[in-house]
Image: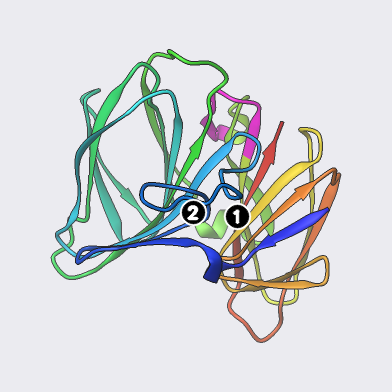
Amino acid sequence: MIAVRPAADRGRTSLAWLDSRHTFSFGGYHDPAQMGFRTLRVINDDRVRPSQGYSTHAHRDMEILTLVLDGALEHRDSLGTGSIIRAGDAQRMTAGTGVTHSEFNPSPDAPVRFLQIWILPERAGLIPEYEQRSFPEAARRNRLTPIAARDGRDDSLYLHQEAIVSLGLLDPGRSITCASEKGGNLYLHVYGGNLELDGKRLADGDGAAATGTAELVVRSLEGSDPARFLLFDLA
């Protein structure tokens, strides 16, 4: 079964410096029917104005992935990490027993857009960790590229959970079959272009949850920008 989550139905936080769309319940947005999918708890699509950002705040007992889509994001945390995450980069932070961090757009004139994803860890009380990888677009065209997994496959980020998170990038007219390794629970989130899934057209911000599904066939539509999406394969 495939259930589509339209972009227009997402929650929203709109501030002077931030425009954030919430696929699942988050912050001041609460929908009992949208509390996540399996171990996937949060997909936030954030746009932060130049020279603005999130001040230092705390997290615990969560696997937090950040994928920068446009611009750059400056990260600082209580582990002593200071880094710039650029378009095509992904970051994993295990909050575990507790970590504080800040996220800031260092550009004086360009906005930053990024996806922040929360996945429930396999257990509480993990030791906090940080890692970051670059996934150049040229190397992942017309294929699925794992960016985070329990086994750290293909030099992806390590996840403390039985899950595989992959990036899809398809040129117009191209198709790909996305198979599940974790038991048939797949979630697809589109962040660019237009694609077709099970006869349904999905665009930027749309999502689809598939249960009891061994594989999904995704096709990028002709006459559009390349389709860009995240695929979550969840136990």
Residue 47 on image: x %, y %: 33, 63
Residue 209 on image: x %, y %: 71, 52
Q: Amino acid at mark 2?
A: Pro
User: From the viewer's perspective, is 140 left or right of 134?
Assistant: right
Going 43% across and 47% down the picture, which residue do you hit?
26
User: From the viewer's perspective, is 169 left or right of 107?
Assistant: right
User: From the viewer's perspective, is 82 left or right of 223?
Assistant: left
Residue holding disc 2: 136
Q: Amino acid at mark 1?
A: Arg
User: From the viewer's perspective, is 95 left or right of 166?
Assistant: left
Q: CA distance from mark 2 to mark 1?
A: 7 Å
Going 31% across and 20% down the picture, which residue do you hit?
98
Q: Which residue appears farthest toward the front when viewing the image?
A: 32
Residue holding disc 1: 140
Going 86% across and 44% down the picture, which residue do you hit?
214
Above or below, comparing residue 71 to residue 187 in the picture:
below
Tell me where the magenta segment starts and ends, as one range: 155-164
Above or below, comparing residue 63 to residue 229 in the picture:
above
The C terminus: image quadrant: top right
Going 48% across and 15% down the picture, which residue do you hit?
124
